[in-house]
Amino acid sequence: MSEQPRNDEIEILSFPIAVMMVSTTKDVFLKRRYALAEAKRAYNLLKQESKDKIIQIANTFNWKIKPAKLEITDFALHFTDFLRNTAGFHETKWKLVNRTMLNGEILLTKDETARLLAEEVRGHIEKKLETKIGLELPQGIANRVELLQQLFWSRKGKMRLEEMPKEIVLDAFPPCIRQLYNTILSGRHISHVGRFALTSFLINSGMTVDNVVDLFRSLSDFNERMTRYQAEHIAGGRGSRTKYIPPKCDTLRTHGVCPGMDEICRRIRHPLAYYRRKLRIMQTATETPTAQRT
Amino acid sequence: MNKIETKAFIQEKFAEYYRLNSASIDPPSSLANREFAFLLFKERMMLRHKGVKNVEDLRTLLKTVVPSDVYYSSAHYEKPEEEMEAKEWLGADLVFDIDADHISTPCGKQHDTWTCNNCGATGRGTPPEKCPTCKGQKFDDKSWPCEICLESAKRETMKLIDVLTRDFSLSPQEMTVAFSGHRGYHVHVEGEVVQTLDQIARKEIVDYMVGIGLEPRFHGLEESRGPNLEEAGWRGRIAKGTYEFLLNTTAEQLEEMGLKKSVVNSLINQRDKILESWKSRGPWRMKGVGSESWKKIVQKAIENQSVKIDTVVTTDIHRLIRLTNTLHGKTGLKKIYVSASDIERFDPLKSALAFKEGTVKLAVFESPEFRLKDERYGPYENMEVELPTAAALFLLCKGAAHVKEEHRRV
């Protein structure tokens, strides 16, 4: 990096020690925050680097990258490297469909390339933090780790965990789920993705497996055993024991489940986030929200 | 023959096919890492989680099991015979499925029929929202692979191949194209480049193909400016789509889109000028057409250029795919490879025939007109006919006929 560190020894050694300390906390959230902070720092340094140096650094991550011939863009990056590092981005400019692609390559500015490299750095550090530390830490460092954890928990405590109401509030359903729900009620067929989205949404918002199964009863191809099996699977009661959540908005859009956005949709990226937000709005609007039991 | 005997007859014919043609069954790559699945004639049950060590095992299995449909996983697993959670996913081919079901075809699907579950009323085309007789909302439907449907599917497949080659830089060696044996085409991309793409990455590829989430402002559409025909990726496609749309559209269609009368007149009356404009900067600066109008036109261009793939198949990294050179249980036709460069001249109703000898006497309940090879059959309604085996099996697999008698030699 071209920024002149005050003391090379401290700069170089502080990184492995920081990694060691964070990974000892075994806290997923803390690890993620740390990796993100390092990535942000990397981004700020990278965007000031020369094109040659950026290519050199990208090569250490085995990127297929080369300088672009066009005047407004600086680099051409293979689409697989692009996709791997944009998975967590939400801005529409990072969608593959909004990029110019030719011969399997995406055209990028230097700033965009630095952003993607920073994302690679984040992934790289997160992986590093997963490695188990075999030896016991010296007392001095162990104390500091403990201090770090305490500080972190006192901050994190402020972040309120949101709770779901005990009853299903139909009026707070996002447009997609409301449409799926009405379709099922009228006995009409919905796609597999639609079924999964509806079932997982209802289960996550507190509906019991029995009630979900009843809802599907009016379908012409209703099969109690199969429906129950699927609902239980989604609820985490079978096989892998993972509880499934509905697909995010972006995915529902891909599969044609999204009927179009309303005002709240524009502020969220997940149907469950819509539900929480709408519930909050309804609660502030009136002290007694219309709750309907299903 | 009654219904059960019809099923036995179909199975016997399938057995004959696998007995005589098992040598034509090519194994997919990384055979030992794939899961195989067989839909059984008996009880329509799916036999899953089968592993196959070598191609001989696979051929023997097909000869002894005689399934109605044969599938293998697009995924590669460390242990393909285990339950899903224990299979250890290693990667998956990138698969595209194009099916007439997902395309609005010019035939309007008039060959498809629906029956109301409530009152038994029947009709043609895609089932209505509500039954016109009893207002019921549940239907059984039967779909047919008509030539127009198949042609539409082929057009979409050609668009897909074009995007894969030009935008994604995949060579013909990296992809295989096949007719599915029913109403569509499959395109497989194999190789290291795509193998380990996760679901999010595959979803992005789907969005790229279909044009979901596309914002024209990222592709050069600005005030009085727009993309050119020779530009790369979606830029060029938007230009091409706009070019084609403005060349073929009518005043009525433009008005339906909500364009102002004056805009419609400009676009229709200046067609020659628009055509000419593509030689330089395109029609984006033309007088009387504002940026709001261009946005609507560009939406049509995107629709025209988007590839109508089944979005679920491509994003599913555990998908089961029909094995090439096996029979389709709904038609008795083969799934067969098509050369990507020669697809335009490919005729599925000629090349996918599996049975070439003998005739069968049938009692047909109802069938629209259809073609196999150069011969046209039907329409039939409650009549007895003697048909070549391939045509007979097609109707039997569709559940549109019963067997009367078989003649092994012509």
Image (spheres, helix red, strand yellow):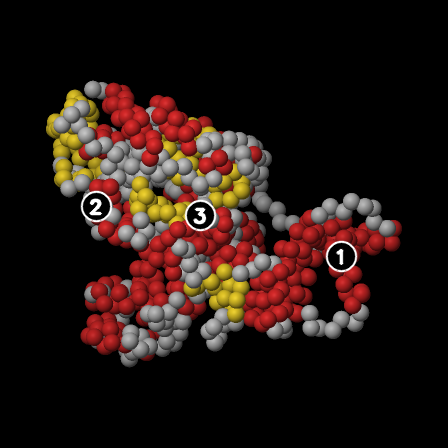
Q: Where is mark 1, residue-wise?
A: A16
User: Crowdedness of circle 1 by 10 Å Cα count: few (<14), some, many (20+)?
Assistant: few
User: Which numbered disc, 3 or 1, marks the residue closer to the eye?
Assistant: 3
In the image, residue B403 lies at what x, y percent?
Answer: 19, 24
Marks 3 and 1, how far apart at CA: 39 Å
Residue plotted at (55% across, 32% down) = A238
Residue B289 visible in the snapshot: no
Which residue has dot 3 on it? Answer: B190
| Residue B298, quarter of the rendered image | bottom left
Q: Is residue B118 above or below residue B311?
A: above
Q: Please, what secondary structure does the residue beneath circle 2 have?
A: helix
**What residue sits 15% from the left and 42% below the top?**
B374
Q: Neighbour class for label 3 at 10 Å: few (<14), some, many (≥20)?
A: some
Which part of the image, by quadrant, shows the N terminus of chain A? bottom right
Which residue type carries mark 1?
Pro
Residue position marked by numbered label 2 in the rendering: B147
In the foreground, B275 or B25: B25
